[in-house]
Amino acid sequence: MSAYHYLQRFYSFPENLRGALNLVPYFQILIYLPFIFHTFSEIAFGVVVICHLLLFPLFFLVFWCKGTKVTAIVLVLNLLGVITSFYSLAGIGFFAFAAAACSAYRKLYASLVLLCVVTFSYLSTAYLTGQSLYVVLTGLFFTAINGLNFLFQLRKYLSNLVIKQSQKEISSMAKTSERERIAQDLHDSLGQSLTSITLKAELAERLLEVDPATALQHILDIKKISRTAITGIRETVSNYKISTLANELASSKFALESVNITCIHHIEATEIPPQVDNTLAMTIREATTNILRHSQASMCEVSLWLDKQLLSLHVCDNGKVVGKVSMGHGLSGMSDRWSQLGGSLKIEFQGGCHIYATIPLK
């Protein structure tokens, strides 16, 4: 590993934590705020700079460590806070980073114990340096309160990461299972037919000169079997192509929530004709695609209800509409499909996108 790649890895957080920690290093500038508002000596500034040069790599390193190594680094960061506090109020910033580093232990009880040690060290140092009540309250905010918030926010981020990973694994397993089912269906559909075709072809070949009439009958049977097999394959493929409302609702919810868009369903259970069910599914799919591609929404709501034999669908989001909006080919095609079934589809852009579809059920 080259020196550049080594430094790049060293001055970064573990991949599973980068989304939660990327902005944290930028807050180190707060360490120098006391020097802006108060007079200071060259020695005090020099001590803070030297301690900061130690703080910067240690704060990255602690999240790559486990167990006692985390404890050791947190205690070193805590010591830097104690040292700098005797020279400047910048020590509060060092204690704040020591408090944040406590979460690197990954175990709640151990992290809380380390946070208590850091908070106690700060209070003791504040007493010895004669800090005012206002400064102590500010320091407690950056140590105890901010440390607790940082700890629980990081644990929540990791929990959500595990959930998303589990969803990906479940989706992958479902796809694998579906592929196996398709393979089994094709095997069941074609296996016997192809075996019969092979046997009859061999018989026809042997009987072609001895008994041409029987050979011809076998050839006609091959023709019949192959046609039956083609019909079976078409029916199998047709079944795969038909989308159902239930499947599309589940797929839509998974796709939207995987990008942090809350998806809410209000579905009244009712018997829906297959053609209408398929059109509903295609409409949900098209609406989901538009939300993912063009919307900046954080919420999507799908409602389906039946009122006096009139089935109504409403899909809405809270995305922002920028500029002039026109219906694309997908939504235009959906509108045509609803018209062919005797229904209607309407789209409005007010506070997001609203898709209304209605159809009378006979």
Image (spheres, rainbow, N blue to C red):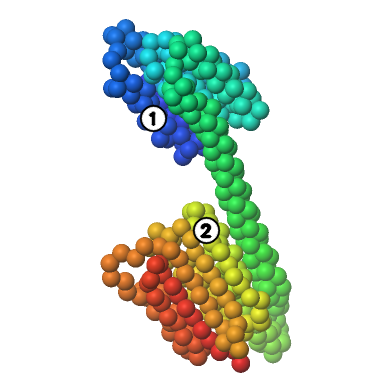
Residue beneath disc 2? 262
Residue at the (41%, 13%) spot, across then down:
84
The residue lying at 36 percent from left, 74 percent from top is: 328
> Visible in this render: residue 136?
yes
Which residue is label 1 attached to?
27
Furthest residue in direction top, as rendered: 43
Question: Residue shown at 53%/31% (left/top)?
Answer: 145
Discs 2/1, front: 1
- Look at the numbered disc 1 and give the secondary structure of its residue: helix
Question: In the image, is residue 78 above or below residue 63?
Answer: above
Report the amino acid beneath label 2: Thr
Image position of 353 with respect to 7: above or below: below
Task: Evaluate whether residue 76 shows in this view.
Answer: no
Camera-side residue of 313 and 88: 88
Report the side of 110 relative to 291 (left or right): right
Q: Quadrant of the C terminus?
A: bottom right
Q: Which numbered dot is residue 131?
A: none
Expressed as whole percent of the image width and height from the top left, the position of residue 166 reads: 61, 48
The structure residue drawn at horizontal position 62% and vertical position 79%, both measured from the top left corner, is: 235
Check the picture and name the quadrant holding the N terminus.
top left
Q: N-terminal of the two: label 2 or label 1?
A: 1
Disc 1 residue type (three-letter):
Phe
Q: Position of residue 46 (x, y in %)?
A: 32, 10
- Where disc 2 sits, the SS reads strand
20, 92: nearer the viewer: 92
